[in-house]
Image (cartoon, rainbow, N blue to C red):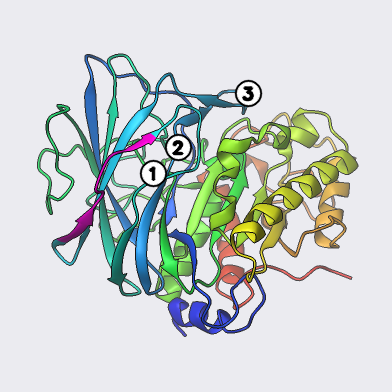
Amino acid sequence: MQFRDILLASATQGGGGVAAAGISSWQIIGEYGEIGFNSQVVSSGAERQFTRIPIITAINITAIQVLNGAFYVDGSGVEQAISNDQQVGHGYIVDGACIGSDAARTTVTAGQGGVLSSLLTANIAAGKLIWLNREVDAPSGGGQGYQTIPYTAGAQYGGYGRKTMGLGSTDLTTVSPASLILTTYRQHPRAVLGYGVHGYTFAVLGDSIAYNNTDTNFGDGGEVGQDSRTLIGGAWVRRSFKKAGRLLGSEIPLAMSARASAVLANVGTARRAIYPYTSVLIFQIGTNDIVGGGKTAAQLDALVEAEIVLYKAAFSAANPLITPKAIVCTLIPRQSTPTGTTSNAELIEYNRRVRHGEITGADGYLDPNAFVASLSDESIWLDGATDSADGTHPTTTGHFKISEGVYPTLMLAQPWLTFLP
């Protein structure tokens, strides 16, 4: 069964995070990378930054629009406004033709994370590749976020690109823009939204374990040889989703909200702006709270429960006929060195709560810990010398082991684990 068939079949079930039969909604289409960690500064004069981004829709949609933001997350995991408001515009290319563009530029106020662009009515079939032409205006010396990390060349879908333009120039409706740089491109939207009957769509609230800052390459998780990729990178979350989607025949909608040094207590309104548009929120966050921040398992449990309440309220307010789902993840081992052997009782206790459904509001779980932890003590690495870069973060090998363990679950009609008794 192809993934789009699973999506459409699940959409008739009236539960499990999807709409009742035939109910359309605005949710994300495509996949979106991690949050930027600084406010990129324009080098000289007022400029227009152009970025070309591929979006693949897993379902039939009848309208499309872009969710924008003008923020970044600093080294302490705190959301920060960029230094200025922005003017953004978008054009949409399908099957070698422009099917429409924004009628007017949208103003994105500094610090916001959920500003919608103009709506475009368009019938786009499941599986279609949509090239988004995006232009962002910023004043001299101004910040240009919302950004994602700059991917390693070759570790992303072929054809991405960006360039600097004068404010009087535009390529919004251009099918094949010239002079694009393929190595770095940060001017991404927060997400692209499609109107249709959606199945599961995912957002991941994450820290550096999902952020891939110790993977060899920054990437979108796609495998070498797929869509012109010559390298792989992207940490276990993106690798898992990419592989599951490839094997099922369609891209799985995914919006990352991951940042190195992130702690749950510092998640704010900008990151939460994605909540109304994804029917599943995955919590891959907590190592900086429970280990780095000294919180107990009970205290982290309470923070997760409170965030679940906020997420489900935001999603349900926008989609009253759809049941949102919150999925919690176990924490992987954390040591001061890759071969450390200090047991952490709070990490072990939190993981027990995750697996046994003791976090109120959680609907299921994923278990990355199971694929890299010692069998006798899950706060210790089974093979830290190979799988951990520093005792906290996985190496490329560690990310691979976790993603190989997790992706089969993402291929199921219920793409998460059922709680243990």
Q: Which residue is mark 3?
A: 76
Q: CA distance from mark 3 to mark 1?
A: 23 Å
Of 417 and 65, the residue lying toward us: 65
Relative to 295, is 178 above or below?
below
In this view, 367 is above or below 11: above
Q: Tell me the element at label 2.
A: loop
Question: Is label 3 in contact with label 1 (beta carbons under 8 Å)?
Answer: no
Q: Earlier in the sequence, mark 3 or mark 1?
A: 3
Q: Residue at x 42, y 34 (%)?
A: 146
Residue type highlighted by circle 2: Gly
Instruction: Give me the residue at 18% from left, 46% from top.
Output: 172
Residue 183 seen by the camera: yes
- The dominant secondary structure in magenta is strand
Amino acid at the residue labelled 1:
Pro
Dot 3 or dot 2: first in sequence order is 2
Amino acid type for the residue under numbered disc 3: Ser
Q: How far, Cα to Cα, is label 2 from label 1?
A: 7 Å
Locate residue 113 relative to residue 88 in the image: left or right.
right
Residue 273 place in picture, x, y as percent: 56, 44
| Residue position for label 1 | 189
Marks 3, 1: nearer the viewer? 1
Q: Are marks 2 and 1 in contact (CB under 8 Å)?
A: yes
Location of the C terminus by quadrant is bottom right
Q: Earlier in the sequence, mark 2 or mark 1?
A: 2
Q: Position of residue 13 (x, y in %)?
A: 62, 83
Q: Which residue has dot 2 on it?
A: 69
The residue lying furthest to the front in this view is 103
Q: Quick one: SS at disc 1?
A: loop
In the depicted structure, whether residue 183 falls above or below residue 329:
above
Q: Residues within 10 Å of mark 1 (few under 14, many from 20)?
A: many
